[in-house]
Amino acid sequence: MQLPIDIEKRSDISLQDQIMTRVRELILHRKLVPGTKLPSSRDFSKQLDVSRNTVIYAYDRLVSEGYLEVKGRSGMFVSAQIPENALNISTCNVGANARAFSLTSKRLLPVRHRSPLLYQRLRERIELDFRIGRPAASSFPERLWTRLLVEKMAGSGRRMTEYGNPAGLEELRVAISDHLQAARGINAHPDQIIVVAGCEEGLNIIAKILTPAGSTVYVENPCYKGVPFVFESYGAKVVPIPIDSEGLCVDRLATRERGIVCVTPSHQFPIGVTMSLSRRLKLLDWVNSAGTYIVEDDYDSDFRYDGSPLTALAGLDKSGSVIYIGTFSKSIGAGLRVGYLVVPEELIGPTREAKALLNNGNPWLEQAVIAEFLASGGFRKHLRQIRQTYLKRRNTLLEQLRLRFGNIDILGEEGGMHLTWVLPKTFSNARAIQYECLHRGVGIYSIDDSPAIDFDNTHFRERAVFFGYPCLSEGEIVTAVGRLADAAADLG
Amino acid sequence: MQLPIDIEKRSDISLQDQIMTRVRELILHRKLVPGTKLPSSRDFSKQLDVSRNTVIYAYDRLVSEGYLEVKGRSGMFVSAQIPENALNISTCNVGANARAFSLTSKRLLPVRHRSPLLYQRLRERIELDFRIGRPAASSFPERLWTRLLVEKMAGSGRRMTEYGNPAGLEELRVAISDHLQAARGINAHPDQIIVVAGCEEGLNIIAKILTPAGSTVYVENPCYKGVPFVFESYGAKVVPIPIDSEGLCVDRLATRERGIVCVTPSHQFPIGVTMSLSRRLKLLDWVNSAGTYIVEDDYDSDFRYDGSPLTALAGLDKSGSVIYIGTFSKSIGAGLRVGYLVVPEELIGPTREAKALLNNGNPWLEQAVIAEFLASGGFRKHLRQIRQTYLKRRNTLLEQLRLRFGNIDILGEEGGMHLTWVLPKTFSNARAIQYECLHRGVGIYSIDDSPAIDFDNTHFRERAVFFGYPCLSEGEIVTAVGRLADAAADLG
């Protein structure tokens, strides 16, 4: 099979990008329908008269973005489900999604939204995968969990058949309140806590009540894709603000109009830096004087290896300006779909209404089990155990990287579940090393192949490589870094 | 304590309504803070110089809307959580919620949304409660469910820690597809099925992709509150269309502009009528020629007692014009928070993207257990059993009502989980009989105290009383209808 594709050899656009764009267009316009097998990289490179690697890289990008899928040894196919049209993420084209449907079309046209691709099919796994944001599956407390499930199920008929409080199960909100007090220095009444189905849902609730169409939302650059995607789906204007080694460059907000500010102070996503105390105080000051809110996503705060964690913004806040997002996706597991918001008192009503309007609350059983897990001390013990495991894995990774590459530039190693290597100028760029590793069965990630987005092409886009280390054993980490060294050597 | 309230004896507005409105204002303006005890109905009626019943009715309305709560015998208090501002539901004030925040206010003001109040605190239960939309707690298959939970948990580490497919667990979508084929005559590929956290979330997804601000949505009048509330929260214009004994008056759509049409054809919510086949075909025709979609909420279709169920609109549809919403909230339990959409092929992509953007999918464990429950035949058996139970309860209710009140006008008794008695003109209105029953420990419901909304004051608002019968035993039903007869006699 030959694909109807022409490429322009003397274009400014790289051959790889041209191939990617053309194939993607064929898929989006249904010239290539789901399930279609693509030509092998060998055949396709002959057809186009380009190097085979160029085709391989283009295919890899299309796979990582979900347009193509590899089926074992039988080749490359158009995905059964075409993903989000999330390719054009280099600029923030807010409003593009808010268009009303065309009145001239025969059929009402659906509005498409960009959504982060967090789901990875099991059969697409990479042998040694430093994928970020995944806890170790082996650490899940399966036996204890099963026991708690059975306990909670006894006499549960009424809880299973009735609607629960959309804001969340009371005992869970009490347990979260206690946990936050002890672990994060946050004094929150259980009424201020709204249980949500993960961070995305928390952002939707915030967007629904605080950022109607036309309002401004400041995000870190780079940041987690979900943040701009959710807010732009409500018609808000998303404005990226740079980060440096102290976190968000708060001074850049000084003269700007009022808007919600979204930050990840504990372990900036994806770079990993911790927001300094002086920046935290400055940010609280600005938000207070502007009369707006901070959204503090504390996704990775459960793991701190070096020094003490800084008090959360929500703990420092004296004026009710911080909306805190917490999650059990990293500390227990994403399969639970349980997170929570902590909101200032005046937002309790609107937040509860928005949650009830979205889905009338989370399932009862998960909530009941997590509540018991927290209240019984099981969670504290679980965190202590996995923190030990993750610390050893992190140490091995740091040691191996330094052994192979010398005194390199690492960010975000003090906490969380991944670290960032900022590649030196003498090295190939992040994506090249990523692909070279992919061919060796090792998954490391550049921004473009992560759930992160870089709005203005910061140096991180070219230079940052992420290593999520919880899921690999120390032995596997040694092997993986060895292969990475080979890959780097091959790239020269 | 005396409340700072004046009422106007010669006003057109009833004394009861005036008291309600004034107390609500005090609460909303925080003059009465949560936890405040209200004067007894005796004291308050003396203060205002009105009958004690007038105060009791006003208090009851405020309780049923969540502004006040009864604490055992210690009296009436302002609720700890003030609900949705859902009082002004007599007209559809779309757009009121879409206002941008005020730029002059010191603090960004949250947008408030109206949300249906489905949650009822356990301590507020009524002794003999015909509350609608609740399955019998005793029917929940607790032992089988626990066994399935334990089975699924074995070796589940990876499923608990990883993100699942936001569209839903594949085995569950396959099982739902098989169920729909057999039970509802719908041929849907599993890819067309999107697992959602209940009907509300399904409506949010539809609103997000198909009804941007300014578009039109047709709803049945009366209908489930959640439908207009969700669409208006996205800025859509909600237009009520009357229903009659054949369901939606489709002719009323003829000359209207294109818009999504939301219907409950199996068992109209809340009235209970079944949409006739000719109306179904007419509606499909109109939607097809207008180039728009039907949203078919098939919430109560699992229970049909007399005759065969009609094929769902989604089963009759040949042109991909129907979005079907199904739920396990009625057939298994609302505590699960699992429902599903079945969408035409061209909406698969946008629907999946919207779901991922909302919350990245449902919890894994519930999905895995429901999938097994469906695939193993457990669900079919469960439905058979509860259908038998509900049928007996329905028959007892019909028999008792006819015994006490003669040849009365009942609607919606052929299926579902509740029926409607349309009171004769010679009777007091629905709300009066409801309150009179409340004082006797019997919960029956008028539209205003149900999750339904009536836009133009149809005769149903004054005359319809709903009886949800699954949760009461036959003996309890006999007692309850006896007390209802006493209440009716007392009202004269």
Image: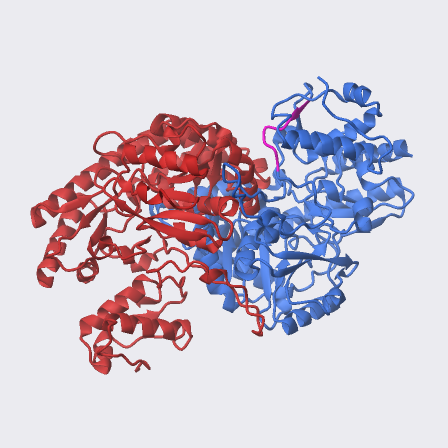
Chain colours: A blue, B red
**Residue farthest top in this picture:** A1
The answer to whether residue A406 is magenta is: no
Whether the magenta-drawn stretch holds residue A82 is answered as yes
Instruction: Please state which of residues B209 and A380 is positioned toward the viewer in this rendering.
Output: B209
Location of residue A323 with respect to A156 vertically, above or below: below
Q: How many marks?
A: 0
**B231 lies above or below A106:** below
Q: Name the residue rendered at 71%, 29% in the picture.
A: A23
Task: Please name the predominant secondary structure of the magenta segment in the image.
Answer: loop
| Residue at the image position 92 percent from the left and 34 percent from the top | A492
Residue A125 visible: no
Q: Quadrant of the N terminus of chain B?
A: bottom left
Q: Position of residue B401 (x, y in %)?
A: 12, 47
Q: Is residue B241 depicted above or below B166 in this figure? A: below
Q: Split into 4 quadrants, where in the image is the C terminus of chain B?
A: bottom left
Residue closest to the eye, A384 or B438? B438
Left or right: A122 with respect to B186? right
Which stretch appears magenta?
Answer: A76-83
Rendering coords of residue A81 (x, y %): 59, 31
Can residue B407 be seen from the camera position used here? yes
Residue A174 shown left or right of residue A1 in the figure: left
- Dividing the picture into quadrants, the one containing residue B392 is top left
Q: Position of residue A129 (x, y in %)?
A: 71, 35
Q: Quadrant of residue B474?
A: top left
Rendered residue at 73%/69% (across/down): A254
Q: Is residue B52 left or right of residue B100?
A: left
